[in-house]
Each structure stands twice: as structure tokens, then as C-alpha cells.
């Protein structure tokens, strides 16, 4: 527990330093999962949270509020009157209760910016959103490690072949969604879907057979550790 508190304190020390390093003329927006709950007492924290917070307070929530108050930051996703299921972003695995732990924080002095005062490009809304998405994604990719999805061994050994089929299936699905009444597109999607399922079974069955032999060998030799490790891969 002491170690956890030290890590938390170090996180907020680093955040304080990072905020302080931002030039005053820049608009500051902070996004993230702070594992902090209890940003609902808008009367105590006037100017820091809006009237639409959620949850009971914890120590991380208090630290977050103190940091925002010190730097004139408003947690803007507490400023919108939404249903609770649209506010929360994480469910506790034991209690099954939903919590608000992801926050958007903006400098208070810039909140008076109005949409009609902003200049927009000549592109449509979809193009503008796509451009914003690309900049956001590329910036995150440049500074954060990319999370590589891990599959079972049978998939990893055949990634390239299987991925081509999955790409074809996705393309057929997108085409069908654009014209759901098309009989030919539905037939094409069902055809590639069946082909993908057959190929996946074709790749998976030999792997499962080898894995069964491996697990049986560990069971026969009373190698409990390897036995359970092998089971966990299935």
C-alpha cells in the first residue's frame, strides 16, 4: 500500500511539472485515466468540477481535484448533463459497479471560446474529424508504445495468411453495410465468412492436437507447473 501511494504521489509530481512547463499562451487540454473517482461535490470544488460529476470520492480523486484547482483547470466532462451510463468508462470486476475514471481537463480561461468565433476549413465535418483523428493517433503513436495484440500460438504461426482472409471479410462486411438489401453482397459476405471459418479450423485443429499431446505428457510426468501453463494457452 505504501508503495502504491508513493507511485501515485510521483505521478502527480510529474504532472505538476509537466503542466508548469506548458507556455502560458498555449491552450492546455489534459486527457487520461487517472483511476480517480468521486468528482461530484461541485459546491466544495466550484470552478473545478461541474454539476454532473459521478461517484464517491477516493484518495486519487482528491489529488486530482487539488491539482486542477492549483492550475485553474476545469474537469469539463462533469459539465454536461448525460445519463450515468454515458459518464462512466470502467466497471469494477467484483462489484460490477461502473465508475467515472477518465477525465478531460481544460484551462478555465479558455472556456468562453465560442464555436461561432472559430474558423473552420472548407472541408466537411467528416473530413475535419478524420484529420483530427489522424493527428491525434500519429501523435500518440510517436510518444507511446503500440499495443500489439497477442493471439494463441496457432494464430501467430499463420498471421499473414489469416490476416489476408480477415481483411477480405472486413471489406465484404463494409460493402454489405453500405447496401444491406443487395443479395449479391450478402452472398459474397457469407461466402468469405464461411471460408475464413474453415481456414481457421484448418489451422487450429493440428495445433490443438499437438497441445493435447503436450499436456498429456506433462500430466504423465507429474510436471504440474508446465501442465497448468500449457492449459492456460488454450
Image: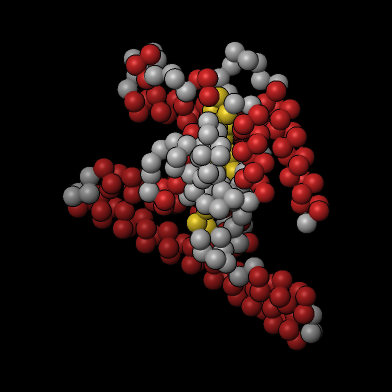
Q: Position of residue 117 (x, y in %)?
A: 38, 13
Q: Visible in this render: residue 130?
A: yes
Vertically, is 41 above or below 17? below
Q: Where is residue 11 in the image (x, y as percent from the top left)?
A: 73, 39
Specify whether 101 is left or right of 85: right
Residue at 43% x, 18% y is 113
Q: Residue 153 or 56: which is nearer the viewer?
A: 56
Q: Residue 130 or 105: which is nearer the viewer?
A: 105
Specify whether 83 is left or right of 42: left
Residue at 50% x, 56% y is 98
| Outermost residue toward the bottom in this view | 220
Locate the C terminus and report the quarter of the image it occupies. Answer: bottom right
Coloring applied to the structure: secondary structure
Find residue 80 and report its image quarter: top left
Q: Residue 20 or 163: which is nearer the viewer?
A: 20
Specify whether 132 is left or right of 147: left
Find residue 62 and report its image quarter: top right
Find residue 116 and report its image quarter: top left
Q: Position of residue 89 (x, y in %)?
A: 50, 49
Q: Residue 26 or 70: which is nearer the viewer?
A: 70
Residue at 70% x, 23% y is 20
Q: Visible in this render: residue 168?
A: no
The mark tally for this picture is 0
Residue at 49% x, 29% y is 134
Q: Where is residue 71 in the image (x, y as percent from the top left)?
A: 64, 26
Amino acid at each position: 500500500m505504501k508503495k502504491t501511494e508513493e507511485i501515485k504521489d510521483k505521478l502527480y509530481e510529474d504532472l505538476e511539472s509537466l503542466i508548469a512547463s506548458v507556455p502560458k499562451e498555449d491552450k492546455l487540454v489534459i486527457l487520461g485515466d487517472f483511476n480517480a473517482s468521486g468528482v461530484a461535490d461541485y459546491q466544495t470544488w466550484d470552478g473545478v468540477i461541474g454539476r454532473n460529476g459521478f461517484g464517491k470520492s477516493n484518495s486519487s480523486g482528491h489529488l486530482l481535484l487539488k491539482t486542477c484547482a492549483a492550475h485553474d483547470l476545469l474537469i469539463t466532462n462533469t459539465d454536461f448533463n448525460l445519463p450515468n451510463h454515458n459518464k462512466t468508462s470502467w466497471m469494477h470486476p467484483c462489484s460490477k459497479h461502473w465508475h467515472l475514471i477518465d477525465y478531460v481537463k481544460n484551462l478555465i480561461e479558455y472556456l468562453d471560446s465560442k464555436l461561432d468565433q472559430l474558423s473552420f476549413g472548407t472541408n466537411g465535418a467528416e473530413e475535419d474529424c478524420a484529420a483530427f483523428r489522424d493527428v491525434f493517433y500519429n501523435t500518440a503513436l510517436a510518444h507511446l508504445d503500440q499495443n500489439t495484440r497477442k493471439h494463441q500460438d496457432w494464430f501467430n504461426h499463420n498471421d499473414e495468411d489469416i490476416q489476408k482472409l480477415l481483411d477480405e471479410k472486413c471489406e465484404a462486411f463494409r460493402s454489405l453495410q453500405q447496401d444491406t438489401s443487395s443479395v449479391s453482397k450478402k452472398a459474397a459476405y457469407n461466402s468469405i465468412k464461411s471460408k475464413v471459418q474453415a481456414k481457421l479450423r484448418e489451422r487450429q485443429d493440428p495445433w490443438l492436437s499437438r497441445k493435447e499431446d503436450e499436456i498429456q505428457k506433462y500430466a504423465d510426468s507429474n510436471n504440474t507447473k508446465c501442465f497448468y501453463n500449457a492449459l492456460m494457452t488454450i
